[in-house]
Image (cartoon, rainbow, N blue to C red):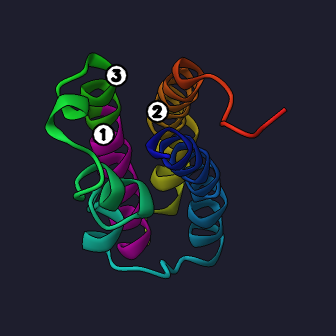
């Protein structure tokens, strides 16, 4: 059962973090963030962060290289997202755009790749074809 939940949670995290680019792009276009800089930068405030640091994942899983890598990449992703949010908040939209297209995109891609790899290590979800 944990296998299926873990697989599902990773899939949800991939989907949710894939939508961050659209939200940040919208913020740059409008000049307004929908969330506070602190909330955007908080890696524990999103679905993935709450799951990674919640009671569902035990110490043995937290001690794996895959978990440690994802946790680090997830923190870096939110730090870069927070930097974009701060730039938007201060009206520095060209800098925010450059960060989104550069460092943020690289961090996002690394996180998504690590999540895909972790999900792949689990194999297909039980009951999936």
First along the sequence among labels 2 and 3: 3
Circle number at residue 118: none
In this view, the residue in front, 15 or 28, is 15
The residue to which callout 1 is attached is 76
First along the sequence among labels 1 and 2: 1
**Picture quadrant where residue 14 is located:** top right
- The magenta region covers 73-90
Residue 60 drawn above or below residue 46 = above
In this view, the residue in front, 51 or 74, is 51
Q: Crowding at label 1, few (<14), some or many (≥20) Cα neighbours within 10 Å? A: some
Residue 8: give x, y in percent of width and height.
58, 49
The residue to which callout 2 is attached is 111
Residue 92: give x, y in percent of width and height.
43, 63
Query: Marks 1 and 2: CB-CB under 8 Å?
Result: yes
Q: CA distance from mark 1 to mark 2?
A: 9 Å
Q: CA distance from mark 1 to mark 3?
A: 15 Å
Residue 83 shows in the view = no
Horizontal placement of 45 versus 103: left or right? left
- Which residue is at 59% across, 21% downward? 120
Q: Is residue 83 magenta?
A: yes
Q: Crowding at label 3, few (<14), some or many (≥20) Cα neighbours within 10 Å? A: some
Q: CA distance from mark 2 to mark 3?
A: 11 Å
In this view, the residue in front, 76 or 13, is 13
Residue 41 drawn above or below residue 8 = below
First along the sequence among labels 1 and 3: 3
- Badge 2 marks a residue whose secondary structure is helix
The nearer-to-camera label among 2 and 3 is 3
- Which residue is at 50% across, 46% downward? 1
- Badge 1 marks a residue whose secondary structure is helix
- Which residue is at 63% across, 78% downward? 30
Circle number at residue 66: 3
């Amino acid at each position: 059962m944990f296998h299926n939940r873990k697989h599902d949670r990773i899939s949800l995290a991939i989907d949710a973090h894939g939508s961050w680019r659209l939200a940040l792009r919208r913020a740059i276009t409008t000049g307004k963030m929908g969330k506070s800089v602190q909330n955007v930068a908080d890696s524990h405030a999103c679905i993935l962060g709450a799951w990674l640091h919640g009671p569902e994942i035990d110490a043995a899983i937290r001690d794996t290289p895959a978990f440690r890598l994802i946790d680090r990449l997830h923190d870096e992703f939110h730090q870069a997202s927070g930097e974009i949010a701060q730039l938007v908040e201060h009206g520095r939209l060209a800098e925010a755009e450059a960060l989104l297209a550069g460092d943020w995109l690289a961090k996002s891609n690394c996180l998504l790749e690590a999540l895909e790899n972790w999900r792949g290590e689990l194999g297909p979800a039980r009951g999936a074809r």
